[in-house]
Image (cartoon, rainbow, N blue to C red):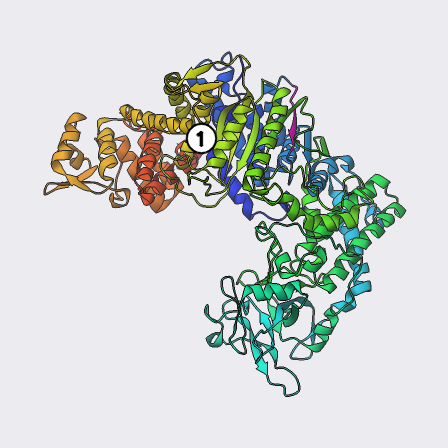
Amino acid sequence: MQKKKLIEVALPLEAINRESAREKSIRHGHPSTLHLWWARRPLAAARAVLFAQLVDDPSGRPEEFPTEELQRKERERLHELIERLVVWENIRDDKLLAEAHAEILRSTDGNPPEILDPFAGGGTIPLEAQRLGLTAHASDLNPVAVLINKALIELPPKFRDQPPVFPQLADSEFRSWNATDGLAADVRAYGQWMRDEAEKRIGHLYPKATLSDGTKATVIAWIWARTVRCPNPACGIEMPLVRSWWLGKKKGKEAYVVPTVLPDRTQPQRIEFKIGYDIAEAPTKESDGTMSGRRGGMCIVCDAVVEKDYIKAEGVAGRMGATLMATVAEGSRQRIYLAPTHDQVTAAAVDHRLDAPAQELGYDPRNIWTPQYGLSTFSDLFTKRQLVALTTFSDLVSEARQRILNDGGSQEYADTVVTYLGLAVSRGADRQSAVCSWDASPSKEQVRGVFARQAIPMTWDFAETNPFAKSSGTWSESVDWVAKVLERLPVEGEGEVQQADASTRDYSNVVLSTDPPYYDNIGYSDLSDFFYVWLRRTLRNVHPALLSTLLVPKAEELVANPYRHSGKKGARDFFEEGFRAVFERARASARSDIPITVWYAFKQSETDDSGEVSTGWETLLEGMIHSGWEITSTWPNRSELSNRMIASGTNALASSIVLSLRPREESSSTTDRRGFIAALESELPDALRKLQQGQIAPVDLPQAAIGPGMAVFSRYTAVLEPDGTKMTVRAALARINEILDQVLNEQEGDFDATSRFAIAWYRQYGYGVGKFGDADNIARARNTSVQVLDRDEILTSRAGSVRLIKPADLTSAYDVLKDPHTSNWGALHHLIKVLEQDGIAPAGDFLQAALGRTDGAIDADLIKELAHLLFRIAESNGWTKDALSFNSLVTSWPEILDVARMQKKPTAAQGAFEFDEED
């Protein structure tokens, strides 16, 4: 009999999701900052999933945990370990990681499997497998992804504890070099040498700005506007195409561009740009900029509206220019905005480097917007000065490689150091491009990267960064980001990375955990060409096989690109066939003792030709089942900072879903609709109870319930409808939702009479008004009365009208120990009031007191189940505020319970009370 793994039964989902969301605000040292990649899974979630994928659920070891209570306690212990494991600050806690690895060894008989992600992308899953002490394998068809993965998992362990070779660092006798410290120090040192050498060669292209008092200041950035000639024959001015005139919006220090038309009798009029500071004269929403996404452009001289088609034609004809609008200089804790000067304009007018990447951009008008405006090669995406800078730094990487060899480093070590420096060149291109924009928001006032979204956008006013300044987008900053990541990478486990097609590679002797591409969400290969052309130029001699092609391979890429596969149908067929091929191949050599895990990222709104929703999600499930897999769990992973209400009864999707799957037995049978529903009714209640006992938010329960429901559906080769046809995934999901509602409704029988009345009344009226007669009938059927419920402050009954009392209207002076008639409904509502009014600690104190009643009237599990049930009712009725209250209580439950489990004990010396954690 197969042992169930923890991921197939219960996860501390709220803790995982909370840390996944918090991770978005962590920058320094986070692996995502090594180099940009799209749609990465959160590290916390990947780490938790891998752990739970390999560790046994206590129910799978009945010889050790024969009772449900023992299983539950052990599950809580493992959940507590996961809760510590997912915290970012613990990623270098060797003791904690060793504890987690010991649990994995215990559940795998001391022989943990090797983990493979065949769609490795940004490297999150292989990296976290390595962090847990596992052998990690990563492969991807995309060479940019392969290089990122090499930098994350393959290269660091080779040089662990090695001192640097840079002369001044190598001579240091006063520090030890642990883990990747020496390697990171060399990346910084040779990166600094590159900066100094580059400044000697091209520093004159970046002159300082002259301030109003005559002093000089380093320029941070130059703000340019693209131009085309006004089509009005009576005007003909070089009209600036500007999205916004704003430069800085920090309160009291606002700054903006002021365009002024200057008459000139000998030639067409021209525009002069000055800097404005008077907030009374600042641009309004109506007057800000000259470009609109809908109407096109507007000439600031003659007010002519210029169609986008005209602008596109001018761009394609090579007649689009650029004019300097402002210079941004370093000030004392603020930006200094200056009007353009002749010397600053002249400095940018340099000769084009002929050896800059000139490959053509891919054709994908959904995600690549510049070619229609004439910017069709990668060189077109940069100013001439930017091309000079990037090619200079690219050339210096090769020179740094030779210096490392001269300084005593081995060939392999030199190649490793310059791989990170090459990534710094590539990631720097994201802030050193002519499609970067200026962020004028109060907290920023800096250059935005190209990939603020998963596309190469067309920008009208763009920002050019000074690579030698001390601000966002500089060379030193790029190197520092890389080094900070390197300093925090694990070096214990082994990592192996290769370029491979997932549909043809070998899957023997590995366990899968992967995040495959989803349909046409992201055109990885076309977008990553932006980086590949620079990586190829910089590191082709270091990684010749990997960087041999002119652009990223595209024909085999598993993405539904309609421009590559003859329209939407061809793209869909290509994707679905390729997807099945991958998982059929993986199924052929899959282990039966450990499930695989597959992440699914989705579009918030998916419709097919008939307008029905979630076709992609259903296609994924159908494809997995068709490939011979049995789905054993589905877990929603939310990395957003706020809860999103789920549409009732639809099992709408979270930001991403992770599925666990096992190979379906070859001998699996078919069943009919009645047999399927009977199996659901038999198995789903226990599964839901375990989900509710775990830390899962009510908002996530419907999605998590798909797992045990689809486990039943996918164990059969087919579920037959009464007419003999096979039941579809869509129909199965509908049945699962019906059983979910049924189980939640049946849970009402576990509650006291007061709570059962209140549930029934809430289902009909919420906290609104109903008639006394209706309330009386419902109360009598539950062996209570309206008068008793009024006395117990569950409701108010006045003049023939009855209304439940909402948490906010309850008295703050309530004492749960002195109330002779309390109920789980009452305790829940008072708990919500305390939580929302005073916070978690007072809520925990209230729960501790409630659970301390001698009559045992309050049950913590029932309070939590009641919150789940009421959330479902509120959400189905659109009572969003109520739903948020119930959901917030459950998501705060672990912390509330921790406080409630603390005991007040008198100290021996003082007789005072202090808190000690309960054993």
Specify the quadrant of the image occupied by residue 693.
top left
Residue at coordinates 66% horizontally, 80% vertically from top-left? 213
Q: Does the magenta stretch include residue 774?
A: no
On screen, residue 232 above or below 22: below
Specify the quadrant of the image occupied by residue 830.
top left
Specify the quadrant of the image occupied by residue 121.
top right
| Residue 94 in view of the camera | no
Place of residue 879 in the rendered image (x, y in percent of width and height, measured from the top left): 31, 43
On screen, residue 794 above or below 450: above
Residue positioned most to the front: 566
Place of residue 504 in the rendered image (x, y in percent of width and height, measured from the top left): 68, 29
| Residue 488 in view of the camera | yes
Q: Residue 408 vs residue 51: left or right?
A: right
Q: Is residue 117 magenta?
A: yes
Residue positioned most to the bottom: 265
Q: Please count the marks in the image.
A: 1
Residue positioned most to the right: 406
Question: Disc 1 marks which residue?
Answer: 704
SS under mark 1: helix
In the foreground, 217 or 170: 217
Place of residue 622 in the rendered image (x, y in percent of width and height, measured from the top left): 50, 28
On screen, residue 842 above or below 273: above
Q: Which amino acid does label 1 sit on?
A: Ala
In the foreground, 489 or 552: 552
On screen, residue 759 above or below 359: above
Residue positioned most to the left: 799
Which region shows up in magenta? 111-118
In the foreground, 803 or 450: 450
Q: Residue 370 vs residue 8: left or right?
A: right
Dot 1, how many residues are within 10 Å of its Cα: few (below 14), some (14-19), or many (20+)? Answer: many
Residue at coordinates 68% horizontally, 30% vertically from top-left? 136
Place of residue 420 in the rendered image (x, y in percent of width and height, measured from the top left): 74, 46
